[in-house]
Amino acid sequence: MSAAVASDAQEWREPRGGGRWTASLGLALLLEAALLGVMAWLISRPAPPPPPVPIEITLTQPKPLPKPVVAKPTPPKPPPPKPLPKPLPKPKPVVHPHPRPHPLPRPKPIAPPVQPHLQPPPPAPRAAIKPAMPVVPPAPAPKPKPLPVHAPDLAAVRLNFEGALREAVQAAVRYPEAARLMHVGGRVLVSFRMLDGKVSDIAVVKSSGIGSLDRAARAAVADAPYPPTPAPLAGQAMHFRIWVRFHLDDNS
């Protein structure tokens, strides 16, 4: 009985050693499965992006800007020199041939003086007496001719006389009181006829638009103290047109 139990115990113990091996094999399989799973997980993961390529930055010193080329002002061309006058040709010296020396004349023999006969000398000739010239009185000096008297310029005389009439009429203006209070002004063109200082045919040629000013202008022409008529215009009937002004500043 004990032998049988012992043999059973030995047979039962052997399986215990085989169980260890089985456990080791199972653990190894489990580890291998785990490694395979890790490897499968690693393979299934997306590949990480490659590292960025380093960008090489090179700092270079900027080149200096070229200096602006300033065009130098070209100096003005000098005027061409004036042509020099041609020198006059020098006169050639005139070479005179040397005169040949003339031989001196031989002295003539001096004749002995002839003694005059003892006769009275002839009378000396009288000088011819010219008759005296008659004295002519000087001619009288010519009388100076009188200077011609120029006729006066009638146009200039009339123009000066018209200016004097204009001043006389303007000095005789009496500003209407109603127009002065209303601060109304203007000018009137008046025509009239004059003969030796007398005025007639007074008429308004261009009205100021205000009756009182027109009447005052006619009254000034009729009552003005006119200067005397110049002599070249005396006896002539003359027609004049004169502007009569009504300004408050002139009559203040």
Image (spheres, helix red, strand yellow):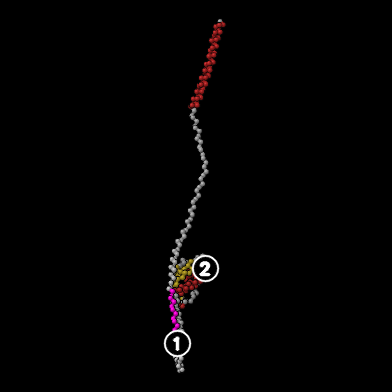
Question: Considering only vertical position in the picture, is 48 above or below 207?
Answer: above
Tell me if residue 200 can be seen: no
Magenta segment, which residues?
A: 98-110
Kind of element beneath mark 2: loop
Local crowd at mark 1 within 10 Å, few (<14), some, or many (≥20)?
Answer: few
Residue 118, x across and y down, in percent: 46, 94
Q: Does the magenta stretch include residue 102?
A: yes
Question: Which numbered circle lies on residue 213?
Answer: none
* Residue drawn at (52%, 43%) of the image: 61
* Residue drawn at (44%, 84%) of the image: 108
Residue 187, x across and y down, in percent: 47, 67
For the stretch drawn in magenta, what is the main secondary structure? loop
Tell me if residue 153 can be seen: yes
Tell which circle, 2 or 1, labels the residue nearer the N-terminal end. Answer: 1
Q: Name the residue under label 1.
A: 111
What amino acid type should be assigned to the residue bearing mark 2? Asp
Kind of element beneath mark 1: loop
- Disc 2, disc 1: CB below 8 Å? no
Residue placed farthest to the top in the image? 1
Residue 56, x across and y down, in percent: 51, 38
Question: Which numbered circle lies on residue 250?
Answer: 2
What amino acid type should be assigned to the residue bearing mark 1? Ala
